[in-house]
Image: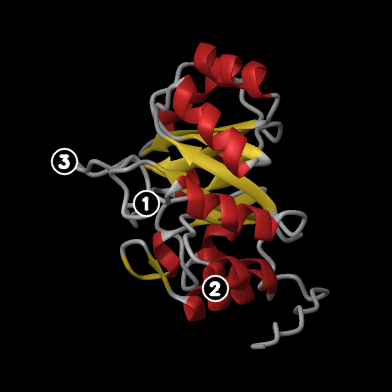
Amino acid sequence: MIPDIKICGLSTEEAVDAAIDGGASHIGFIFFDKSPRHVALETAERLSMSARGRARRVAVSVNADDRALDAIVKRVAPDMLQLHGGETPQRVAAVKERYGLPVMKALAIREASDLALMEPYRGVADRFLFDAKAPAGSALPGGNGIAFDWTVLGALDDAVDYMLSGGLNAGNIAEALRQTSARGIDVSSGVERAPGVKDIGLIRDFLAKVHALDPQHQPAPARSAS
């Protein structure tokens, strides 16, 4: 079965269309000004409206306060919020209650012991995103283009719904899915030609590689250039 596929860090109409037309189930907009993938609210609003009903729209933030999230939710109308900072379980619960939206909590993983970070969020977060720990000195909690040892996820029970992230690309995605039970995958830097600059060909190639794992998948017709 093909997992959910999230193409994250989108900032142009062309990239949004390539992601959705290629079969992405989720698209992500990043609201974190230290990231090269940060997108202005007005741009995200326009792109989100064009994607409405075509894919699930995920708003990604890092330790954002209510004022920032209020603006994101009002203008972008996301289908899900992704909290990618040090938000506590209490903060996750408060965000869910305030906005009535599902919340995906990102956690940084390097070794099996890091999976214990998940326990306080069980029953609070609707989904997890397991990303590689950022290298020393990095200002970014994600999008660093590095992977972790996927085999550590074998210790998880089947009840854990998670997206796999960190260093994924067209060349390693089949192996990543073979080694894990991920029900979703998330890619950003792996489909870029430079930090924050999505490559349409890489987006299409990544999505094609994932869908090729399902022999029953029928590719969507190419979008007209008109």
**How many labels were placed on the picture?**
3
Q: Report the Cα–Cα distance between label 3 and label 2.
A: 33 Å
Q: Report the Cα–Cα distance between label 3 and label 1.
A: 14 Å
Q: Left or right of 86: which side holds 21?
A: right
Evaluate if marks 3 and 1 touch, with contact meaning CB atoms under 8 Å apart.
no
Q: Residues within 10 Å of mark 3 (few under 14, many from 20)?
A: few
Q: Which residue is drawn at 68% across and 41% down?
A: 79
Q: Which residue is drawn at 55% across and 68% down?
A: 13
Q: Which amino acid does label 2 sit on?
A: Glu
User: SS of the residue at dot 3?
Assistant: loop
**Observer able to see residue 159:** yes
Q: Which amino acid does label 1 sit on?
A: Gly
Q: Picture coordinates of residue 62 (x, y %)?
A: 40, 33
Q: Residue at x 49, y 66 (%)?
A: 12
Q: Earlier in the sequence, mark 3 or mark 2?
A: 2
Question: Which residue position is annotated with label 1?
Answer: 143
User: SS of the residue at dot 2?
Assistant: helix
Q: Left or right of 18: which side holds 9?
A: left
Relative to 51, say whether 131 is above or below. above
Question: Which residue position is annotated with label 3?
Answer: 137
Question: Which residue position is annotated with label 2?
Answer: 14
